[in-house]
Amino acid sequence: MIAETVCSAVAAAGLGIAAVTAYRKRFLAATRIAAYSLVPLGLVMTGVVEWLADTAFSPTAWAGFGVLGVAWVLFMTTRAVERRRGGTRKERKEARAAAQRDAVAPAASAPSLGAGSRQSTRPATAPKAESGDDFSDIEAILKKHGI
């Protein structure tokens, strides 16, 4: 009952200030003040203030807020741990898969000294693909770069 009275008084005072502001030819500011002053009155009329007053004095409601707080702390803790580890499980899995794709055979990592040494390690005749011209442009690019 007291909260409703206080909100109504705040709304009345705000409307009075809006009227004085409008009298001073500051209509935009007066309209904004009137809008802000009508918010508490609307909250009283919709019953939100009564609900808040009932919630403020309810031990069950405070226990619910405590549970929400614990859930929030747990969520933020897991987010912090994920950031330290380097991302989510999906991101770590993708990174491992990329590392495996980029891995090369031990013989492939031998240094090449020039075009002559590459030719000696390469077989004389490379097997052709059965599809014919499908890879001819790729082979041309690779030959151009000496691969």
Image (tube, grey):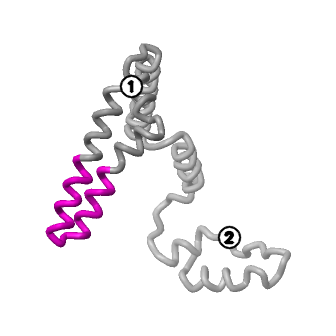
Q: Quick check: is 29 in the magenta stretch?
A: yes
Residue 52 at x, y percent in the picture: 41, 29
Give the number of the disc on residue 112: none
Corner quadrant of residue 77: top left
The residue at which mark 2 appears reads as 123
Depth check, front residue: 58 or 9: 9
The quarter of the image holding the N terminus is top left
Query: Which is closer to the viewer, label 1 or label 2?
Result: 1
Residue 67 appears in which quarter of the rendering?
A: top left
Q: Which residue is mark 1?
A: 53
| Image x and y of residue 96, in percent | 55, 46
Residues at marks 1 and 2 touching, judged by CB atoms closer than 8 Å: no
Q: CA distance from mark 1 to mark 2?
A: 86 Å
Q: What is the x, y in percent for residue 68?
A: 45, 26
Q: Residues within 10 Å of mark 2 (few under 14, many from 20)?
A: few
Q: With 44 as the anchor, is 147 left or right in this view? A: right
Residue located at (42% from left, 37% from top):
79
Amino acid type indicated by mark 1: Ala
Q: Which residues are magenta?
A: 13-37
Residue under the point 67% across and 81% down: 139
Q: Is residue 45 magenta?
A: no
Q: Secondary structure at mark 1?
A: helix
Query: Vertically, is 86 above or below 110?
Result: above
Numbered label tally: 2
Q: Foreground: 70 or 101?
A: 70
Q: Is residue 34 found left or right of 52 in the rendered image?
A: left
Which residue is outermost to the left? 24
x and y, in percent, of residue 110 in the image:
50, 59
